[in-house]
Image (spheres, rainbow, N blue to C red):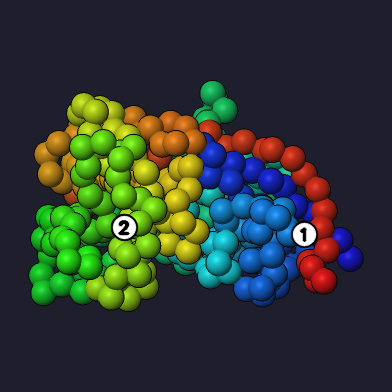
Amino acid sequence: MRTPFTKMHGAGNDFVVLDGVRRPLRLTAEQIRRIADRRLGVGCDQVLLIERPTRADADFRYRIFNSDGGEVEQCGNGARCFARFVRDQRLTDKDEIRAETIAGVIVPRLEPDGRVSVNMGAPRFEPAEIPFTAPARAEVYDLELDGTVAQVSVLSMGNPHAVQIVPDVDRAPVATQGPLIERHPRFPRRVNAGYMQIVDRAHIRLRVYERGAGETPACGTGACAAVVAGRQRGLLDVSVEVSLPGGVLQVTWDGPGRPVWLTGPAVTVFEGSMDLDLT
């Protein structure tokens, strides 16, 4: 039996979205890798599976699988595409949707201008909650990398992030250093590596080497983490425009204990169907 899918993107971060509400689906890691393969499958950074919720306070269960087949806790760009998908597929008529994730419940909101905003929850900084190996919480940590040291801000946006400030994001060693940070032994569940250039207090440029996916055109949780890191160091304002290779996102954070809001596009590219046995 062929399975319908929708190809979507949020600022260039692309997804294959599957409806597991009308027809329950069980995906193996090998199936996810083949779906995500840009030569042998549809091609995407992540596969999103929408299911019925398992908790009473959520409208849907939203699951995220990286292109390497592993399931992860959170994806901000995916959350916006999830919200657009369930509305376009008439699975809900709500403008504000409660989505169950591994990291907890998030609340995407469809805006009148066509963009989608997501309450990403409050960031977490305690090393054990990220998780990150450190004797105590600090604003900046020294991370040893093959004879060099990177100064990183470390936090969780439902998934782990290590953010460093660079003078020129175009020259940042994303391709070479990113994999070293992603699999650094101090991050037991690996980490997303962000490279932030501060243009001014209301504008940053950002590249992210994503855990399990490599560098992507945009990373929503990475944008949130970068703004939080900059705010913690007194370098950014409450609302910040984040320019990524794939597009522009807006991040707003009022400070400790408050949720981070992420706003940006969610675009349907095309629809199709595929054989999930992939033989």
**Looking at the picture, how far across and down is residue 206, in whole percent?**
34, 40
Q: Residue 87 falls in which quadrant of the image?
A: top right
**Looking at the picture, how far across and down is residue 220, in whole percent?**
43, 45
Badge 2 or badge 1: first in the primary sequence: 1
User: Which quadrant of the figure contains the C terminus?
Assistant: bottom right
Q: Do residues under tags 2 and 1 come within 8 Å of each other at their CB atoms?
A: no
Point 34% across, 30% down: residue: 241
Q: Amino acid at mark 1?
A: Arg
* Total residue callouts: 2
Relative to 27, residue 168 above or below: above
User: Which quadrant of the figure contains the N terminus?
Assistant: bottom right
Point 66% across, 59% down: residue: 37
Relative to 250, residue 42 above or below: below
Separation (CA) of disc 2 from disc 1: 43 Å
Answer yes or no: is residue 128 visible.
no
Answer yes or no: is residue 195 visible.
yes
What secondary structure is marked by label 2? helix
Query: In the depicted view, which residue is nearer to us: 193 or 87?
Result: 193
Q: Nearer the viewer, mark 2 or mark 1?
A: 2
Indicate left or right for 156 with 135 as reference: right
Point 22% across, 65% down: residue: 145
**Looking at the picture, how far across and down is residue 160, in whole percent?**
33, 62
**Looking at the picture, how far across and down is residue 108, in whole percent?**
50, 44
Indicate left or right for 230 with 50 as reference: left
Which mark is drawn over residue 22?
A: 1
Q: Residue 110 falls in which quadrant of the image?
A: top right
Q: Amino acid at mark 2?
A: Gln
Mark 2 = which residue?
177
